[in-house]
Amino acid sequence: MAGASLLALLDDIATVLDDVALMTKVAAKKTAGVLGDDLALNAEQVSGIRADRELPVVWAVAKGSLKNKLILVPTALTVSWIAPWLIVPLLMLGGAYLCFEGFEKLAHPLLHPDAENETHHAELANPKTDLVTFERDKIKGAIRTDFVLSAEIIVITLGAVATMTFMVKAVVLSVIALIMTVGVYGVVAAIVKMDDAGLYLCQKTGAGLWMKIQRKVGRTCLHATPYLMRLLTIVGTAAMFMVGGGILIHGIPVAHHFIEYLAQSTNTVPAIGGVLETLTSWLLNILAGIVSGALALAGVTMAERIYKRFKD
């Protein structure tokens, strides 16, 4: 009896681990859209920080991110236990916010050209600026931004594991929170030091082939860093529209079936039909995200104007 009970326990543990592995993979795919924007935003947060303080700032923000997730994961589990019907509305709200944030990012340069950069450079150029206070404010702002992005990740993950047991939910949410934190801030640390590494390699002296290769790699790193930041921003924004639009579309059955029909209608050529179907689905989700973001930004802008009018 004892042996049979032990085997049954081991079988249950193996089943749970299989479920955790499967759902972690699914959740990681669904949260990939937020990841690109998270990388770009956090890499931008260290702009203006002295080179020797970049890694300490990234480490401080990473610790703040872990604290954010220590708040968000238990909160999400409590919601799924007490009011599971809230998961879908929260997921839709998170998708709408992703679309809003993405479209606001596109519209910001048109609505407020150079306003943010001028303020930032003026603050750094001011000799009276306290760099310690400036750094502390940077960290606080980055942690606030991380809280919003972490909430999106947790809500999307919770939606992916909504039908699983409480144990699987808890483990998957914890694993995703840890992986995203370590992954994002590890990559951010590498990105912000990429130009320093390139400069170090460029300053290598010597006439050997190995030294020439190192200097070539260093120059490549220096030239590639700004383009990498731009690429991260573009990919992150597109991914926000794709993920946010996809979440909203999945929450509206009629729209979801219509997009599925359009995507499947491209699957007519055996060799490339599957690729076309996937690309069509992505593009339609991105389009839905852009439209949703535009509507959300228009609604928020109108609400702000009405509030200011009544306030005045």
Image: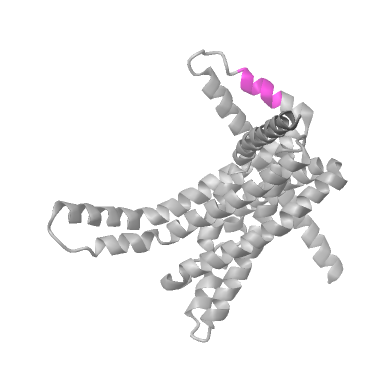
Q: Relative to residue 273, is residue 200 drawn left or right?
A: left
Furthest toward the left, the residue is 207
Question: What is the x, y in percent for residue 74?
Answer: 76, 53
Quarter location, residue 286 = top right
Seen from the viewer's position, the closer of residues 244 and 103 is: 244
Looking at the picture, does residue 158 appear above or below residue 133? above
Question: What is the x, y in percent for residue 283?
Answer: 59, 33
Looking at the picture, does residue 155 appear above or below residue 246? below
Quarter location, residue 258 = top right
On the question of residue 106 being in view, the answer is no
- Inspect the magenta stretch and tell me whether residue 262 lies in it: yes
Q: What residue is at 49 percent from the left and 77 percent from the top?
A: 124
Quarter location, residue 206 = bottom left
Looking at the picture, does residue 290 appear above or below residue 48? above
Quadrant containing the C terminus is bottom right
Q: What range of the chain is rendered magenta?
A: 258-265
Question: What is the x, y in percent for residue 126?
Answer: 50, 82
Q: What residue is at 57 percent from the left and 26 percent from the top?
A: 278
Q: How is the image coloured?
A: one colour
Question: What is the x, y in percent for residue 270?
Answer: 51, 13
On the question of residue 200 being in view, the answer is yes
Q: Relative to residue 306, is residue 146 drawn left or right?
A: left
Q: Relative to residue 305, is residue 282 drawn left or right?
A: left
Seen from the viewer's position, the closer of residues 288 and 200 is: 200
Looking at the picture, does residue 119 appear above or below residue 200? below
Instruction: Give the overall secondary structure of the magenta segment.
Output: helix
Q: Relative to residue 185, is residue 219 drawn left or right?
A: left
Q: What residue is at 41 percent from the left and 56 percent from the top?
A: 226
